[in-house]
């Protein structure tokens, strides 16, 4: 099978449509002056659908077994596991604690071994995202206490 991009494109497009359908059930507040709870999931669904269409239109790609082997590599599976753990723990732990740990784990999985990166990148990215969400989007992130 030489049309792996078409197959992956259709799968990604279907995932985007599925996320959009699931977003329809997210309750919204009519008079809120902030982003609705469904904004980012809907944005994600649009991005997934567009990427799926681009992959589909690209046409032929590598043999599907090669793509499948790449997708299911141990590094990618570790990234999925770390992201799933972060997502599931996000509502129960302080954002300022769990996000630097997640970012450091991703750096480690991706092969970074520089000590300064493990300090400055996770802390800096967490601080920037906190300020962006708290003061830019006016969205409160989970905190302890």
Image (cartoon, rainbow, N blue to C red):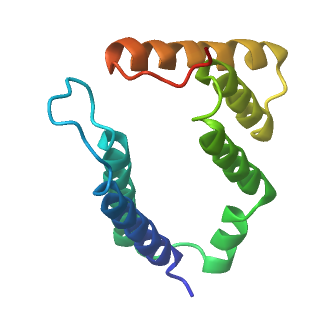
> Above or below — where is 121 with respect to 52?
above
- Where residue 122 appears, x then y in whole percent? 67, 20
- Where residue 69 appears, x then y in whole percent? 72, 70
Spot the residue most to the bottom: 1
Spot the residue most to the left: 31
Q: Is residue 66 left or right of residue 114?
A: left
Q: Is residue 122 left or right of residue 18?
A: right
Total marks in image: 0
The quarter of the image holding the C terminus is top right
Residue 63 in which image quadrant: bottom right
Residue depicted at x 48% and y 78%: 7
> Above or below — where is 58 with respect to 38?
below
> Above or below — where is 50 with respect to 87?
below
Q: Is residue 40 left or right of residue 74?
A: left
- Where residue 44 appears, x then y in whole percent? 38, 48
Residue depicted at x 36% and y 11%: 135
- Along the line of sight, the residue nearer the viewer: 94 or 62: 94
- Along the line of sight, the residue nearer the viewer: 140 or 19: 140
Residue depicted at x 45% and y 12%: 131
Residue 76 in which image quadrant: bottom right
The quarter of the image holding the N terminus is bottom right
- Along the line of sight, the residue nearer the viewer: 27 or 16: 27
> Above or below — where is 53 with respect to 84?
below
Residue depicted at x 67% and y 78%: 65
């Amino acid at each position: 099978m030489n049309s792996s991009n078409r197959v992956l494109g259709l799968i990604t497009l279907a995932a985007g449509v599925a996320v959009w359908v699931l977003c329809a059930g997210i309750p919204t507040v009519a008079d809120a002056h902030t982003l609705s709870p469904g904004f980012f999931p809907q944005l994600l669904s649009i991005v997934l659908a567009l990427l799926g269409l681009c992959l589909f239109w690209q046409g032929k790609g590598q043999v599907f077994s090669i793509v499948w082997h790449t997708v299911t590599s141990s590094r990618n599976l570790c990234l999925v596991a770390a992201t799933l753990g972060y997502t599931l723990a996000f509502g129960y732990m302080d954002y300022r604690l769990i996000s630097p740990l997640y970012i450091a784990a991703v750096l480690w999985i991706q092969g970074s071994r520089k000590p300064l990166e493990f300090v400055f990148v996770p802390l800096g990215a967490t601080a920037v995202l906190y300020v962006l969400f708290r003061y830019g989007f006016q969205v409160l992130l989970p905190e302890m206490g």
